[in-house]
Image (cartoon, rainbow, N blue to C red):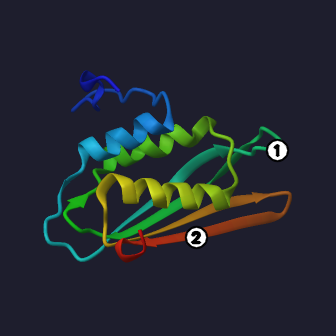
Amino acid sequence: MPENYWLPRSGPMPRPRSIAEAVEVLKHEAFPAPGVSKVRFHAREFTAICPRSGQPDFGEVIIEYIPNQLCLESKALKFYLWAYRDEGAYAESLAARIADDIMAAIQPRYVRVVVRQYPRGGIEIEAEAERSAENS
C-alpha cells in the first residue's frame, strides 16, 4: 500500500481496495493504549456476501479486546469492516479472520469477535472467535 494512502483526517473515506490493505490501515492508524482495561466495539451495519448464493448477508460484529500496547482507531476499524462488503465468506470464517487480523494489527492480550448474521431463510447465525497472546 502506498504510504500516501492512509485515511484522510477529514472528508469522505476512500473505499478499501482489499482486506489486506484494510489490515495495513488498522496497523498504521493504531494508537498507544491509554491505560484502559477493555475495549468493545459494536458495529451494527456489517455486510458480507454469501459464498453460495452471492446474496448480501447483513448483520453485526462485536469486537472486544484487552489492549497490550496499542488500541484500534474507530475510523480505521470502519474502513477495515467495509472491506468485507464484497467478500464471499461464511460467518464462522469471518469471525476467525477478523480475530486473526486484529491480533496481527495490534497484538492485544486478548480479543473476542462475534459475527451475527441476521435471519435469512429463517436462520440467524452467530459465530465467535477468541484469541489470546499466550496462544499465538
Identify the residue at horizontal 45%, vertical 28% (top origin): 15
Badge 1 amino acid: Arg
- The disc, 2 or 1, on the residue closer to the chain's N-terminal end is 1
Residue, disc 2: 128
Residue, disc 1: 52
The image shows residue 13 at horizontal and vertical percentages of 36, 30
Above/below status of 18 relative to 4: below
Helix, strand or loop under label 2: strand
Q: Give the quadrant of the N terminus.
A: top left
Task: Please tell me in which quadrant of the rendered image residue 8 appears.
Answer: top left
Residue closest to the eye, 59 or 88: 88
Identify the residue at horizontal 26%, vertical 68% (top origin): 67
Q: Is residue 105 left or right of residue 117?
A: left
The image shows residue 103 at horizontal and vertical percentages of 38, 60
The image shows residue 53 at horizontal and vertical percentages of 83, 41
Above/below status of 48 relative to 32: above
- Count neighbours of disc 1 (C-alpha within 10 A) and say few if under 14, some if 14 to 19, many if 20 or more: few
Q: Is residue 39 left or right of residue 98?
A: left
